[in-house]
Amino acid sequence: MTVFSKQFDTKLRLAAGAVVVLLGAGGAIAAYLFHPRQIDTGYTPVQPVPYSHKLHAGNLGMDCLYCHTTVAQSNYAAVPMTEVCMNCHVRVKEKSPKLQPVRDSYASGKPIPWVKVHRLPDYVYFNHRAHVTAGVSCVSCHGRVDQMVEVRQVQPLSMAWCLECHRNPAPHVRPPELVTKLDWQPEGDPAVLGAKLIREKGIHPPDNCSACHR
Amino acid sequence: MNELIQLNLSSQTGRKYWRSLNQLADTPEFRQWVEREFPEGASELLDSGSRRTLLKLMAAGFGLAGLTACRRPVEKILPLSKGVEGYVHGRPLHYATAMETCGIASGLIVECNDGRPTKVEGNPRHPFSLGATNAFQQAAILDLYDPDRARQVQKQGVKSSWAEFESWWLEQSAKLGDGSGLRILSARSTSPSLEALKAEIAKKYPQSAWVEYEPVSFDRVTEGARMAFGQALVPHYRFEQADVIVSLDCDFLGLDTLSAQPVKQFAARRKPEDGRELNRLYSIESNFTITGAMADHRMRARASDVASVALALARELNVSGAELNVLGQNSGRQQKFLAAAAKDLMAHRGRSLVVAGPRQPAEVHALAALMNQALGNTGQTVVYTRPPFAAGDTLGAVKKLAEDLGAGRVSTLVVLGGNPVFALPADADWNALFRKAAVAALTFDENETWKAALWQLPEAHPFETWGDVRALDGTASIQQPQIQPLYGGRSALEIAALIAGREQRRGYDIVRSYWAAQWGAQAEQKWKKALFEGVIDGTQFPAVEAKADAPRVLAAVQGALKPAPAGIETVFYPSWHTLDGRFANNAWMHETPDPMTKLVWDNAALLSPATAKKLGVKDGDMLELSAGGRQVRCPALVLPGHADDSISLQLGFGRSACGRVGRGVGHRVEGLRAAANFWFGPAEARKTGATYKLVTTQEHHTLIEPITGLKRHNIVEEFSLEEYRHRAEHGKHEEHPATDLFGGFDYSKGYQWGMAIDLSACIGCNACMVACAAENNIPVVGKEQVAKGREMHWIRLDRYFSGDEEDPQAVMQPMACVQCEKAPCESVCPVAATVHSPEGINEMAYNRCVGTRYCLNNCPYKVRRFNFLNWNKDIPEIRKMVFNPDVTVRMRGVMEKCNYCVQRIEEKRSQAKAEGRRPIRDGEIVTACQQACPADAIVFGNINDPESRVAKLKQQARDYSALEELNTKPRTTYLARVRNPNPELV
């Protein structure tokens, strides 16, 4: 008596093959779906104050550095202190109900709980100072914030995306004094100017592990 | 393992090094440590439960993990409402402050990240720090965040408040009258502000008494000066000026000075390239201390015999011109030693030094002062100043306090700091005596004193409170708080102000007003300068002209000294872990091995191999020690090189009332310590038959000495000065030609980081280990895990003995990842988690590591550490505040190791780029171990720059690579230890 039929072996192989294919396909779909490009880009959380970058940085033409003061000194660009908002808003729209959380924060000393948009894992040590002083513009990572009513993430901020630029920085390098001019375009190919700046200033973006992971 | 090792081949220098008596005897237990990275069973992840249960748990864990990871966590950014001057988010701020331990103050600079103090460094402007720190100062930051600190004002265990205490005090003080019932018992203090308050209290309560007590005190030093010069003085040794040093039981490089200054000065004279003559150290001691390990000649003598040795030395030096009677008989070998030392001293008049240890009686200190005077050293290598504290007979005052308490003469006792119930001499039952008065105790943790007090008051940490301190030479510093008191603690200064009845009772006001009165018109400006610099100009005490009447002093000394009785004696030492018990709840200190015994998480009765044989004990056998009708039990640990018939005990263990870390760790020996044998005295030792598990790391990570051409190569190299000169003439020894298995990287361009560690300067003081733990968020694993070889330190101190087991020499070798250019770990990593940076650093990407541990198995230096468990899982929230934000906190299953403080390199690189893309200057980047090192033994820099300090050191004749034969091309190289033996004694 035979326990297994003659075709059993073939069926088993087919089944095993199917499992492998399914797993592979599943993995591929998961990898696509869960890629930072899908998951993270477009993330637009609701902020406690409906602050519009389009109004302030775009229409009014305020420089990024007016609020994000520490971008050239520290790892962090710094979300401004309530005090900075109140520099203007003691006079401008001083009664607006939308600004009530700002006035409350100023009066109580408690921070405004802004929601983080651009989030990196804890083991990534991104340094704003290093990038801004080298001439990498805000727009390269954050997009046209001056056109956004609500800030959203436009780039995946994945490691592969970081490395793309670290391996070929030329298209993203401009004179450092122009980093906050989000609409600036060089005459001609940006990569040509970038390559020239890189040569002159000796910019070598690292691509070893501990440049970002410590 | 290579079978050839069993042939016991001689090495090139003829020395054989061993790390433990097991290694000397080549026991199977030791073999296991050499051949395996971890002992049998250490790779089992869990103590209980099988691998099968683990797999089940893991499967469930993965399932759940898949569900939770789909949602992006919402994180908040919380900027300040109003700005703080000078504060930039993400940039650390540094504030100068000071801290005193046992009355010895050092200036510090504390790094604060977003308001959290995270790291302690030395203050280069402070004369007792000179930019360096010791292990205790490094570990102080962990105590700040200790969740087991005293956190609540209590009255006999019932929750109360400062306001209630103050109103109680007002009531109580109304009854005090002239203060005949008031006693204040404080830790030793050098604070000028507190001194002023003391005077106010003495004026308000003329009959009260203020007693200062420290279990680790330097009273005998000042009393010795009183004996010699008629006034209490503090000797200041200038080790950098001394060519010949004789230490009489003085661990001046270790726990007998508690500051970086002597180490800095001494080590400056141990570097033969510097062009200055190498100094020569003779050490006479009972315990084998790190000073003994640095000594060129070492004599073992019981602590009680040191007096007779000192007398014999004084006679050799012809101190008085008259014949001196020497107590007892010194052996022929000792005679020869002393004669040679005396001759050497006399050949270096005015450039030599005799130092006596704080355990030795006043007479020995007086003798040392006389010898220095006879040698013309006074004013040259030793100067005297008045002490910065109230010097006096502490033990007499303590005895009086016990009598007063016992007789009911004390109505109110205020304890300001310390832990007197635990640490006071065992002559009296302090627990019972404390019940006889209303005791208000200000203590840092809920210790034995806290438990015995009526009012239990939480003390603020030195980093939480305003204060001022004086260094040993009088230099004053303002103690500046780094953070608001975390648990509402107050300082001794603030309580003293309450007792003095002052209106202003905030630490800031007390200190500010004291110094304003000193400075007059320029107070504001000087205050700012004092805060900025961390030292106050012009506060150093002037040197005192000290001259002793030699014959009179000698007569007094000879009259007081008695021959020491034969037989076993016990000697009390501060502990490398807890000091005197104050660091008993500090896990960093417990896990950092004792420099000589390599013991962790315990204290032990140290004895010599011969004494152990006599008592019939081996490591871990419980001893019962008795003296004066008191008994304590302590496990024995054999220390090669220890004096015979002497047992060394470390204070500060076996705390019954302590936080979670230190409760019940070790054995309390204070129970044996009475005024009569405060430092040492005769005792009886008996084997009890019980055993206790002691864990030492001395055999962990034992390196295999490579053998080529039937020659064994030492891991540590040392030469005599003569051999060194010979080598220096003939240049660096030849490179071994070797074939590379792997293609090379191009290391000729850019920054190439490297390190040179000077074994001639390294004293093995552990400062680097604790600094590394603080900088790199290195977890603590506990005694049981260390027993399995799972300790996590990135840098360890290997202590090697050479010579016979009774009287060996010792040498220390700091060992961290040596950053091999041809790294064996990299080629075996299946996921490229450890790879080389273009600047020569062997990098570890934690988020890539899958934990195969292949790299660890392949590392010949045994410097890689594996997170067997999530060591950070159960730590309290508040403890997390000490983490360095620039370094990842590692998870379970991840490999880690030294990376030359890559976060500091990247920070300086980013800074240099921001400043116009200038090159990084030599010496700009300092690693955490280098910064802490009081001996300047560690130099880091760019080896591609021929002008850098590290590149120059690597050109020295004594530069060598450990395990060079393996052709790993390590970036960290060592400078061989150079000893300077006296030719007459070789």
Image (cartoon, rainbow, N blue to C red):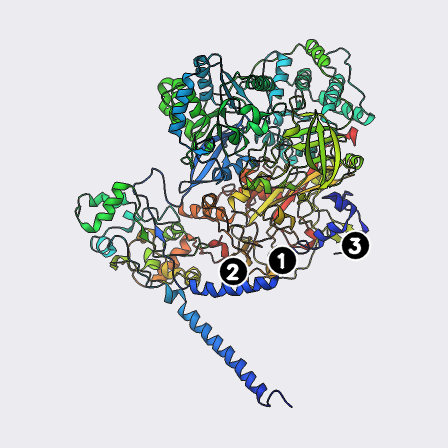
The tag on residue B44 is: 1
Q: Is residue B617 left or right of residue B176?
A: right
Q: Nearer the viewer, residue B223 or B864?
A: B223
Gap between marks 1 and 2, in whole Å?
23 Å
Residue type at mark 3 is Leu
Q: Is residue B519 left or right of residue B771?
A: left
Q: Which callout, 3 or 2, points at the residue further toward the start of the chain?
A: 3
Q: Residues within 10 Å of mark 3 (few under 14, many from 20)?
A: few
Give above or below for A214 relative to B189. Answer: below
Q: Residues within 10 Å of mark 1 (few under 14, many from 20)?
A: few
Q: Nearer the viewer, mark 3 or mark 2?
A: 2
The tag on residue B848 is: 2
Q: Residue B784 appears at what percent x and percent y?
A: 62, 48
Q: Residue B250 appears at what percent x and percent y?
A: 66, 27
Disc 1 element: loop
Please name the residue that numbered disc 3 is placed on. B4
Q: Are marks 3 and 2 on the same chain?
A: yes
Q: The numbered mark 1 sits on a residue in which chain?
A: B
